[in-house]
Amino acid sequence: SQYVNMGRELYETEAVFRAQLDHCAERLIPDLGLDLRSLLYPPEQDSAAAVRKLPHTAFTQPLLFSIEYALSQWWMTHGIAPSAMIGHSIGEYTAACVSGVFSLEDGLHLSAIRGRLMGEMPSGSMLSVAAAADTLSLPTGLELAAINGPEQCVVSGVTDAIQKFALELEKRTVSCRLLHTSHAFHSAMMDPMLESFRA
């Protein structure tokens, strides 16, 4: 879901959103070795380079966490306060942070470490499928990564297997779409990073 200039109008016009995003970006510099705002809101001449770098999960995860956190703070200043929260993947981290499970600094650090460790895993792909999960027969190398609704799920795994599965689904007129990811998130392909992340 990340893209260059994501949230730019909010950043330029809303002081609370800008201050929160600035704080997150500055705090992440030691973890990332760069300022996320250089990828998010690059000068025109650097836009193509930012487009190439932004999909790398080492940057994507802390970026999405930062945008989500800044948005939550912006909503709350407008009187929209959550009574409950839920999230998926990096959204779980944002929900946990906003609800006080851990501090913003810990959330930023965790999202950066998680992104870096996941980025070190073998690449893979993810496929959004417009079908009930229990109607799919997944080939070897693929796993169910998420169930987003009664007729909407995500499959994750080795890129070749994902591409073949997508062709098979299309032949059966089952709508599917490759997601803009660098890895097979929420699959066993991420397991080798767990021990380091836990530590």
Image (cartoon, rainbow, N blue to C red):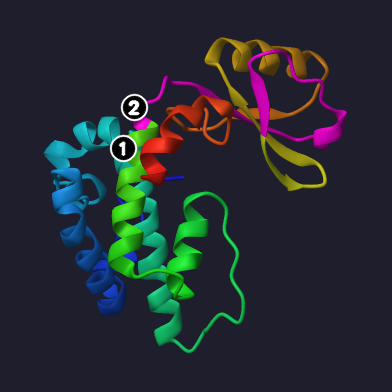
- Compared to residue 156, the image places residue 63 above or below, namely below
The magenta region covers: 119-144
Residue at the disc numbered 1: 116
Viewer-proximal residue, 96 or 174?
96
Direction from residue 86 to residue 93 in the image, left or right: left
Viewer-proximal residue, 173 or 162?
162
Q: Residue furthest right?
A: 135
Residue at the disc numbered 2: 120
Viewer-proximal residue, 101 or 129?
101
Q: Amino acid at mark 1?
A: Arg
How far is mark 2 from mark 1, CA to CA?
6 Å
Contact between marks 2 and 1 (CB within 8 A): the answer is yes
Crowding at dot 2, Cα within 10 Å, few <14 / some 14-19 / many 20+, comes out as some
The quarter of the displayed image where residue 116 is located: top left
**Residue in the image at 59% along x and 70% along y:** 85
**Residue in the image at 57% along x and 52% along y:** 88
In the rendered structure, find residue 104 and report the number of the disc placed on it: none
- Compared to residue 120, the image places residue 164 above or below, namely above
Q: Is residue 33 visible?
A: yes
Q: Quadrant of the C terminus?
A: top left
Q: Residue 59 in the image: state x and y as whole percent.
A: 29, 42
Q: Amino acid at mark 2?
A: Glu
